[in-house]
């Protein structure tokens, strides 16, 4: 068997998801049956200080010779890096990704890719010009669970999908959790609001079931009608957004298909983890596929067929296992000991693409990321949600 190729990562930003991603990245890939690649972290950068980057490397268990930088500009100059993972607030993705691409670095960039479609288009153009890999880090697309769901659809098991309901919401009290209005979830300067942060996953489920599963040459963009409720205290951020999408399809492929995608910072599908309610329902004439919350990290699917068949499947995330002392999670929530978070699947795809010389992600290419950004632009237009010009602009560099 050939020796696995090691991909050397640079981590740009040191916040919550950068920590989760980096810990997952450093889990031995053979624990999930991946043998052709390995990952290592060679550097991390913080925009605030070198010491913060040093602490980040320590906290994530990165190799002791990994370099710590006190600015993103220094990171992109590091010649040992194969790919940079960007984990800043979405307001900053465009400027940060341009910085990386301009310096000749491959990029895996957190969702939402950018603030608007024009920015994603400009990044895609730059990546093409420089012949670099660029992918939106929509990790859920790379889960074995998602591959299974898409397979159920393309195999025709439930017939042509006619309708999808997709919710990704959190029933929080934003006035209490984000009382000063500065947090990235509600702060307009950081492209706050439910749509770009959570609604992207509702749209992910709609697109991976109604668009990505269609043959490439016949896929067509959806029409969209949206209602958007502004979050009172900061105004230019959405609290609850509801989208109706209609996807044109040929009569042979099932004809027009509909979707309702919802997102909220105040009400949700899941109120208690024991309250099993499917947040994603994918309906065809022969049956329905249900995916249980959270929509971004689901671990349970149910296939309910018209003939009475019910197939439940559980998809626990692999990892180093019990007794390993490995702990990961996001925010306050910790996964059971030894269980990965599931962010390694997208990292494996990015690494594999780089090894194979591919320039885009396999399960969501740049054209699809751009289309989803266009849908979100349209939703914001209909809902009157505009962010400050400095984060909507495609002018690079712009000081944020
Ligand atoms: N895939 C997922 O499951 C998932 C989950 C959560 C978040 N996300 C995405 O990941 C991104 C970051 O989210 P997060 O929850 O990790 O945020 P966070 O904890 O606030 O971290 C963001 C980091 O970005 C850097 N940063 C640079 N300029 C900043 C500024 N003006 N304000 C705040 N931070 C700034 C900071 O790191 P330095 O000081 O080191 O530069 C900060 O620690 C967002 O785009 C979000 O949508 C994805």
Image (cartoon, rainbow, N blue to C red):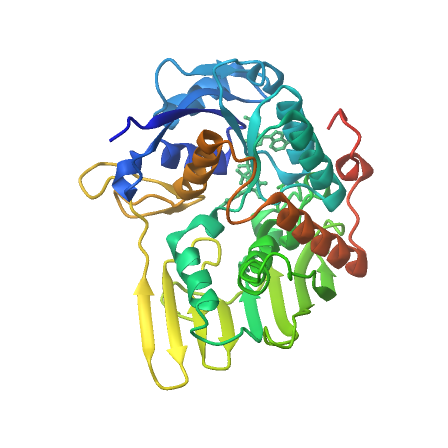
Residue at 45%, 81% in the rendered image: 286
Residue at 28%, 48% in the rendered image: 336
* Front position in the image: 293 or 82: 82
Residue at 38%, 73% in the rendered image: 303
Give the residue furthest to the left. Answer: 323
Is residue 281 visible in the rendered image? The answer is yes
Count of numbered circles on the image: 0
* Residue 131 in picture, x, y percent from top left: 62, 28
Q: Where is residue 39, by image quadrant?
A: top left
In the figure, 300 relative to 99: above or below?
Answer: below
* Front position in the image: 123 or 378: 123
Give the residue furthest to the bottom. Answer: 307
Q: Where is residue 226, by image quadrant?
A: bottom right
In the figure, 246 relative to 67: above or below?
Answer: below
Quadrant containing the C terminus is: top right
Quadrant containing the N terminus is: top left
* Ligand 1, image quadrant it occupies: top right
* Residue 108 in picture, x, y percent from top left: 54, 35
Q: Is residue 47 left or right of residue 278?
A: right
Q: Where is residue 91, by image quadrant?
A: top right
* Residue 127 in picture, x, y percent from top left: 65, 31
In the figure, 46 relative to 324: above or below?
Answer: above
Is residue 298 visible in the rendered image? The answer is no
* Residue 353 in picture, x, y percent from top left: 48, 35
């Amino acid at each position: 068997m050939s020796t696995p190729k090691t991909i050397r990562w640079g981590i740009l930003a040191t916040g919550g998801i950068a920590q989760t991603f980096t810990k997952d990245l450093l889990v031995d890939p053979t624990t999930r049956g991946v043998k052709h690649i390995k990952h290592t972290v060679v550097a991390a950068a913080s925009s605030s200080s070198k010491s913060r980057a040093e602490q980040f490397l320590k906290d994530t268990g990165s190799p002791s010779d990994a370099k710590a930088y006190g600015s993103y500009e220094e990171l992109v100059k590091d010649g040992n890096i194969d790919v940079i993972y960007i984990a800043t607030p979405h307001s900053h993705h465009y400027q940060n990704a341009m910085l990386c691409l301009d310096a000749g670095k491959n990029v895996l960039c957190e969702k939402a890719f950018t603030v608007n479609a024009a920015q994603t288009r400009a990044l895609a153009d730059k990546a093409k010009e420089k012949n670099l890999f660029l992918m939106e880090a929509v990790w859920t697309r790379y889960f074995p669970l998602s591959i299974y769901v898409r397979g159920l659809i393309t195999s025709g098991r439930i017939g042509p999908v006619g309708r999808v309901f997709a919710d990704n919401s959190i029933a929080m009290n934003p006035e209490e959790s984000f009382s000063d209005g500065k947090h990235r979830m509600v702060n307009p300067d950081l492209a706050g609001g439910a749509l770009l942060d959570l609604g992207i996953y509702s749209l992910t489920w709609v697109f991976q079931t109604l668009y990505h599963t269609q043959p490439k040459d016949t896929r067509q963009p959806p029409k969209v009608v949206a209602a958007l409720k502004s979050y009172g205290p900061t105004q230019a951020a959405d609290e609850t957004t509801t989208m109706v999408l209609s996807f044109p399809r040929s009569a042979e492929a099932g004809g027009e298909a509909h979707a309702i995608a919802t997102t909220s910072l105040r009400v949700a599908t899941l109120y208690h983890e024991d309250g099993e309610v499917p947040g994603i329902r994918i309906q065809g004439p022969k049956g329905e596929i249900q995916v249980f919350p959270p929509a971004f990290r689901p671990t349970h699917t149910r296939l309910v067929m018209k003939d009475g068949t019910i197939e439940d499947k559980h998809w626990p995330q692999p990892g180093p296992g019990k007794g390993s002392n490995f702990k990961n999670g996001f925010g306050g929530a910790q996964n059971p000991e030894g269980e990965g978070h599931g962010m390694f699947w997208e990292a494996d795809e990015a690494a594999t693409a780089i090894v194979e010389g591919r320039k885009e992600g396999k399960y969501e290419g740049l054209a699809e990321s751009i289309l989803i950004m266009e849908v979100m632009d349209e939703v914001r237009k209909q809902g009157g949600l505009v962010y400050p010009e400095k984060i909507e602009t495609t002018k690079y560099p712009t000081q944020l």
